[in-house]
Image (cartoon, rainbow, N blue to C red):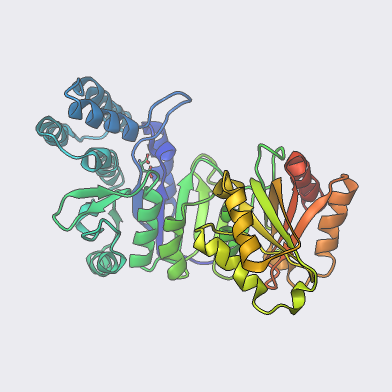
Amino acid sequence: MKNYEKKVVKFGGSSLASAEQFIKSANIIKAEASRRFVVPSAPGKRFDGDTKVTDLLIACYKNSAEGGDWQTVFAEVESRYNDIIAGLGLDLSLEAEFAVVRDNLAKGTTLDYTASRGEYLNGIILAAYIGYEFIDAAEMIFFDEEGKFDANKTNTVMSERLSGKKNAVIPGFYGSNPDGSVKTFSRGGSDITGAIVARAVMADIYENWTDVSGFLMCDPRIVENPRPINIVTYRELRELSYMGASVLHEDSIFPVKLASIPINIRNTNRPEDKGTLIVTSTDGYRTDDIITGIAGKKGFSVIRIEKDMMNQETGFAMRVLKVFADLDIPFEHLPSGIDTMCVVINAADIKGREYEIASAIQRAVNPDHIHIDKAMGLIAVVGRNMAGMPGTAARVFASLAKADINIRMIDQGSSELNIIIGVDEVSFKRAIKAIYKEFCN
Ligand code: ASP
């Protein structure tokens, strides 16, 4: 276990949905003096079918913009906060804050301002409950004239403002425009705020507290009870998320990755679980698993181009790829042989354009045949430990052969970080199960 002195801890909506959840989060914060900078979300769902405070606020905005009744929904927001305050036994009133928001809604405010109040008000309660200083994110997180997040200005202002502070609560999800008005990140954006704060204070680690004990090795809808991933590198994570694994939002990884700060995904309801640790390099961490995770996506097409003596034609591949660039169609993989070249494309990107593509390729390289195969699923077997480990690919293929699954495509980059396998969509789930069983059981 490493010794951490400065942690940034972000708590998601379910971790702060009720007084009971607040108490769990506060206990986690208090358990370690290093948990000095805290980023809260707005209160999330307390039970299945409940509504997040952010969604209630968005409804308030919509109703007010349409001249409807927003007051009833806003009263619900108020009671969510008042219940938390009462449940915590806090001597705190948010009446004056509610009045400001009501006043702004009545005058006609923006959606971003309204939505951001979920985090703002929750931050005030949390700061009062744990005795930390509250600092409004609008004073430290900036967007530029074009509405883009201004990382440099934010980092300069925030690191200066937080330097020397013992602790602080900084509400997630929003910052401010150059004119001072509030602007939010996209939904789920408190994760981004946490990463920004972690970079600004140069935290030893960014803990992201949620309601799951980290990422799973594969989709639990395909494999029952998959094992959690203990350690994953930022590069592996990118491969997994690109191939469909739902992990953290790219923007929320960027600031901490830039500063080489590890992220630890933890479960507020099971603080004893270690969760998933995301690191730049696994130096100093023990890891035995050959495979880190398996992810996959359906919906690919393969355009197969065949031409005798293709290998002797200089510039063949370049002319084919120019066709796709000119048509503004991105490609995913390029597995090739001596006389064949295959271009793997997201099927949705070429739907209805097959004829146009085939004729453009015909004109560009005059091939003997062009085939378009549809309904392929791609599976990425990702693992940094595969590099230099003979026999891993053989085990992947043997497990598929044993399950009687035909492999339509194989692609392995020389970094050996992943092996990509193309299978018929009908065999997709079975293939993931077979690979998981081979390596993880
Ligand atoms: N409260 C916001 C949302 O529901 C942001 C967040 O929770 O991260 O999207």
Say how many tags the image has: 0
Q: Is residue 209 above or below residue 323?
A: above
Left/right of residue 18 with respect to residue 76 in the rendered view: right
Q: Where is residue 122? Give x, y as percent.
A: 29, 40
Q: Where is residue 147? Give x, y as percent.
A: 26, 56
Q: Which image quadrant shows ligand 1?
A: top left
Q: Quadrant of the N terminus?
A: bottom right
Q: Which quarter of the picture shows residue 290? A: bottom right
Q: Is residue 57 above or below residue 392?
A: above
Q: Where is residue 5? Give x, y as percent.
A: 42, 66
Left/right of residue 295 with respect to residue 114 in the rendered view: right
Q: Which quarter of the picture shows residue 206? A: bottom left
Left/right of residue 305 with respect to residue 41 in the rendered view: right
**Residue toward you, 198 or 384:** 384
Q: Name the residue located 11 percent from the left edge and 30 percent from the top edge.
A: 106
Q: Is residue 51 above or below residue 395?
A: above
Q: Does the rendering let one see residue 289?
A: no
Left/right of residue 76 with respect to residue 304 in the rendered view: left
Q: Name the residue located 15 percent from the left edge and 54 percent from the top edge.
A: 180
Q: Does the rendering let one see residue 250?
A: yes
Q: Where is residue 15? Give x, y as percent.
A: 43, 39
Q: Name the residue located 52 percent from the left edge and 49 percent from the top edge.
A: 266
**Residue toward you, 323 or 179:** 323
